[in-house]
Image (spheres, rainbow, N blue to C red):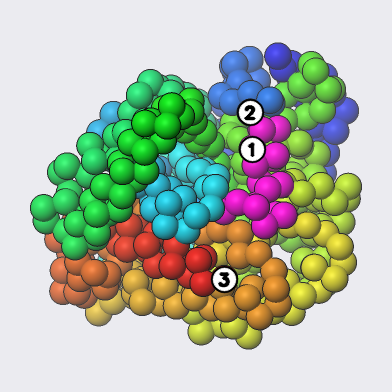
Amino acid sequence: MTVNAETHAGGNTWRHLPAAQQPDWPDQEALRDVIAELESYPPLVFAGECDQLRERLGAVARGEAFLLQGGDCAEAFDAVSAEHIRNKLKTLLQMGAVLTYAGSVPVVKVGRIAGQYSKPRSKPTETRDGVTLPTYRGDSVNGFEFTEAARIPDPQRLKRMYHASAATLNLVRAFTTGGYADLRQVHAWNQDFVKSSPSGQRYEALAREIDRAMNFMNACGVDPEEFRTVEFYSSHEALVLDYESALTRVDSRTGKLYDVSGHMLWIGERTRQLDHAHIEFASRIRNPIGVKLGPTTTAEDALTLIERLDPEREPGRLTFITRMGADKIRDKLPELVDKVTASGAQVAWICDPMHGNTFEAASGHKTRRFDDVLDEVKGFFEVHKGLGTHPGGIHVELTGDDVTECVGGGDEIFVDDLHQRYETACDPRLNRSQSLDLAFLVAEMYRDQ
């Protein structure tokens, strides 16, 4: 049970501070009306679920589990369909099965889903053929179409984000508890995929092994409930603070603040300024918090973030998601991990191998090389192995659809193929085949630790 945060001192302390990457809403009165309406809406997630995820992430921080976090770069309102959501979930379930079985490790599964509708941008405007318009900031703010009308920030979109997130979560909950996520489904998740893809065939071989193991346990009279359902949590970047604040509530059990828009929230590389609004907002809520750390992050920055966001040193509260780039990870990460570990803090270290490895192809498409993605993950594992610390997980942009957005992978995509199915609204994502390739390779690296 939660009540609105407005009744609780501290729910809006961020409003007195500078806030990067916020929309320039043209109609402040319309924004106030939308915020008031959002404040009356029911929670999308519950405080107890956030507490449960914090416990699971505590196991990751202690080296007892692995975090798989993945999903769209930016969700789109027109992609809230059963097929899109099922395909994304199916890919994450398959990756989770590979990591759990081949890596012999419990896997905490968190989607970039049901709230990932807002995107930070490097420039406030975009120019095409001499026309300059506001940049696209995600479906929660404005439209993707390059027209003056579409690019005007519209606060009504915040209500659409809430309803799209509610519909997505409703379907995810049904899939994960209603039989679809049953481990006996490992073959069914693959039927449309196995014939055409090398990674699908490799997965099918692993599914047969899982079947044999489950039949053995069944014959021994063991049939745990955990095989029938799956714990699956939602996460997104807490970017548009008007929305996040409107969905912040006081938990009636504890009197603590929770942002009930998602289980886990992260602060991006562009909004983690220590004296700005996003860190202040995150410091006030009890959700598990992630912070993206790019190559300019100093050890002092990391230690100050711990002071601000995890003063109690609670395993599971704070996750550092490193996004260095394949060429920098081995140089930049060791000092951060070393100094944080020496401080006694127990954070979960997660590798985002996507955001530091983007480049523009000759065709004009933003893309990533699968080999660069893989190399950053390898570097991440090497650093942790060298320091005797735990490589806690991966954070990837992926889709369950057969898109052509990243080059390489076992079922190789070439630069000349990018135009075929380039469907992302923002950054390039791994497709299902590339995602499974990555899961197998990460499982091997984990075993080698």
Circle 2: element type: helix
Of badges 3 and 2, the one in the foreground is 3
How far apart marks 2 and 1 lie (CA) works out to: 6 Å
The answer to whether residue 323 is left or right of residue 299 is: left
Query: Can you tell which mark lies on residue 49?
Result: 2
Q: Residue at x 25, y 33 (%)?
A: 83
Whether residue 35 is in magenta: the answer is no
User: Would you say the magenta stretch is mainly helix, strand or loop?
Assistant: helix
Where residue 22 sits: x, y (%)?
A: 61, 48
Query: Which badge, 3 or 2, comes first in the chain's sequence?
Result: 2
Q: Residue furthest left?
A: 195
Instruction: Check the image and report above or below for 210 versus 252.
Output: below
Query: Can you tell which mark lies on residue 53?
Result: 1
Q: Amino acid at mark 2?
A: Glu
Instruction: Check the image and report above or below for 65 versus 351.
Output: above
Instruction: State if disc 1 and disc 2 touch (CB < 8 Å).
Output: yes
| Residues packed near mark 2 inside 10 Å, few (<14), some (14 to 19) or many (20 plus) | some
Instruction: Check the image and report above or below for 93 versus 345.
Output: above
Circle 3: element type: loop
Instruction: State if disc 2 and disc 3 touch (CB < 8 Å).
Output: no
402 and 24: which is toward the camera: 402
The answer to whether residue 86 is left or right of residue 201 is: right
How far apart marks 3 and 2 lie (CA) works out to: 31 Å
Of badges 1 and 3, the one in the foreground is 3
The span shown in magenta is: 50-67
The answer to whether residue 52 is left or right of residue 81 is: right
The residue where tag 3 is placed is: 449
How far apart marks 1 and 3 lie (CA) works out to: 25 Å
